[in-house]
Image (cartoon, grey):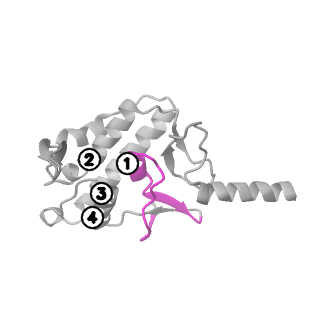
Amino acid sequence: MPEQANLPFVRSGDHPALDFLNTVLKIDGRLVDLLESDQDVLRWLSETGMPVENQTAKLRSSALIQAARSLRETIRTLVERRKAHKKLDLSTLNAFLAQARSSIQLVAAKDDSLHIERHWENSTPEQILAPIAESAAELFATADFNLVKPCESPDCVLWFYDRTRSHHRRWCSMAVCGNRQKVAAFRKRRA
């Protein structure tokens, strides 16, 4: 079980499902869970731009965090199995998707342009997490999994979708893991 900490969320996955997966980090050799409470899950959804209405008053305490951790580990298992070219058991993700209830509305902007907004019901933890589950389903159905990669740093557990032009991205963050690896390689060459 990862240790818990109140740290900012990491946004290096270049896909919402991978950013959700990356709410567990490795810091000083220990796994750290950035999702400590129902409120952390709602904050992650809000900061990611996913629809959030605070409905946790209707939920039993910790129901959302438990469901979020279950969904996150389901996504992790599916990503790892897909990368290893193993058969996927989609039943758990599909169970989340089956509970999603949404509708779309046509909305007029101030300039009279029209756009579609999707609204999700959110009376259960699974419904609150439906946008993440749908994002994960979209990732598995449409992403080129040759471009879904784990960070190459041995001290990192983060994943990302390599959308660079050359598709040679190696690290979750050049500023953090990439820099560490380059400094280590430089020191090794100098020794």
Mark 1 or mark 4: which is in front?
1
In the drawing, does residue 39 fall left or right of residue 59? right
Q: Earlier in the sequence, mark 2 or mark 4?
A: 4
Which of disc 1 and disc 3 is earlier in sequence?
1
Is the Cβ of the residue at disc 1 closer than 8 Å to that at disc 4? no
Amino acid at dot 2:
Pro
Q: Is residue 5 magenta?
A: yes
Element type where label 2 sits in the image: helix
Q: Which residue is mark 2?
A: 131
In the displayed structure, would residue 148 be above or below residue 87? below
Can you say which quadrant of the picture contains the N terminus? bottom left
Q: Is residue 113 magenta?
A: no
Q: CA distance from mark 1 to mark 4?
A: 18 Å
Q: Is residue 121 left or right of residue 95?
A: left
The residue sitting at 14% across, 46% down in the picture is 112
Would you name the residue on which mark 3 appears? 45
Q: Residue furthest front?
A: 111
Residue 40, numbered label? none
Q: Which residue is mark 1?
A: 16
- Judged by depth in the image, the label closer to the viewer, 2 or 4, is 2
- Pick out the residue farthest to the bottom: 6
Give the amino acid at mark 3: Leu
Q: Is disc 3 surrounded by few (<14), some (14 to 19) or many (20+) residues within 10 Å?
A: many
Task: Name which of mark 3 and mark 4 comes first in the sequence.
Answer: 4
In space, the residues marked 3 and 1 are separated at their CA atoms by 10 Å
Rounded to the nearest angstrom, the CA distance separating label 3 from label 2 is 9 Å
Question: Closer to the camera: disc 3 or disc 4?
Answer: 3
Q: Is 183 drawn above or below residue 148 in the view shown? A: below
Pointer 4: what residue? 38
Q: Name the N-terminal-most of marks 1 and 4.
A: 1
